[in-house]
Structures are given as C-alpha cells and as structure tokens.
Amino acid sequence: MPALLGGHLLQGPAEPAAAVRHLVLDSRRAGPPAGALFVALRGPSHDGHRYLPQAYAQGLRLFVVEENAALPGGLAAYPDAGLVAVASPLGPCKRWPRRTAGSLGAPCGPSRAPTARLS
C-alpha cells in the first residue's frame, strides 16, 4: 500500500493482512476501527496529526501521515499501528475510489471495489 499511496512505510502494522475498507478523516466520526485508515490532514487552522492519539485510543491501527510530521508521542506511542508517510496526505484522499459519500470517506470492499493492504 505505501506505493499505492505514493509514500513509504514508517512502521508496519501488527496485523500485516489488515485490509483497508474506508478512510477516516475526522477522529470524532471514526466509526468501527476494523478496516479504517486514518488520514492526518493538515490545513490552515487544523492539524490531523494532533488527533492520532485519539484515533489510536478508539482502536484505529492504520494511519497516513505527512512526511516529517511530528507525531504526538513519536512512533513508540503507536506500537502495533501501521503508518505510511506521504508528501501530502491529501493526495491519497483524492485518488481513493469514492463510491459513497459520508463522514467516513469512501468505503471499499468486495461489493464496491478492491480493498488495499498496508503491508
């Protein structure tokens, strides 16, 4: 998946076969953690990287972060999480298949589109 996202693997997930089924752009609306990929977006008045601890506490274990971004607590704070670093997290969001609108982004799976794996 790092190549698909245009980035590199910072840390492999504890569960290498974890399939990505939907993007999460807002940790307050993460929903079920299974199959969720949290994308840490940065804007003029917010920084999604600040919410990695909250998303991790909710059970999310797959993350896309900006290259060279300061991660709250460092990599050690996310021991079993998979993290991919990209130049701009917005890029993968634009390329992700958009089959359904909603706060969770774009669900994917056997009935909609191929899933992707972080490993």
Image (cartoon, rainbow, N blue to C red):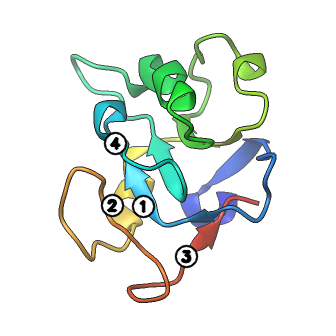
Label 4 or label 3, whichever comes before in sequence order:
4
Q: Mark 3 falls on what kind of element?
A: loop
Q: Where does the image place residue 6, in percent across and percent down from the top left?
A: 59, 57
What amino acid does circle 1 point to?
His
Q: Is residue 17 left or right of 19 when viewed as pictured? A: right
Which residue is depicted at the point 39% across and 26% down? 48
Residue receiving disc 1: 22
Task: Please state which of residues 54 and 32 is positioned toward the viewer in this rendering.
Answer: 32
Residue pushed farthest bottom?
111
Where is 67 relative to 54, above or below? below
Where is 85 relative to 108, above or below? above
Quarter holding the N terminus? bottom right
Q: Mark 1 falls on what kind of element?
A: strand
Where is 114 relative to 76, above or below? below
What amino acid does circle 3 point to?
Thr
Residue receiving disc 2: 94
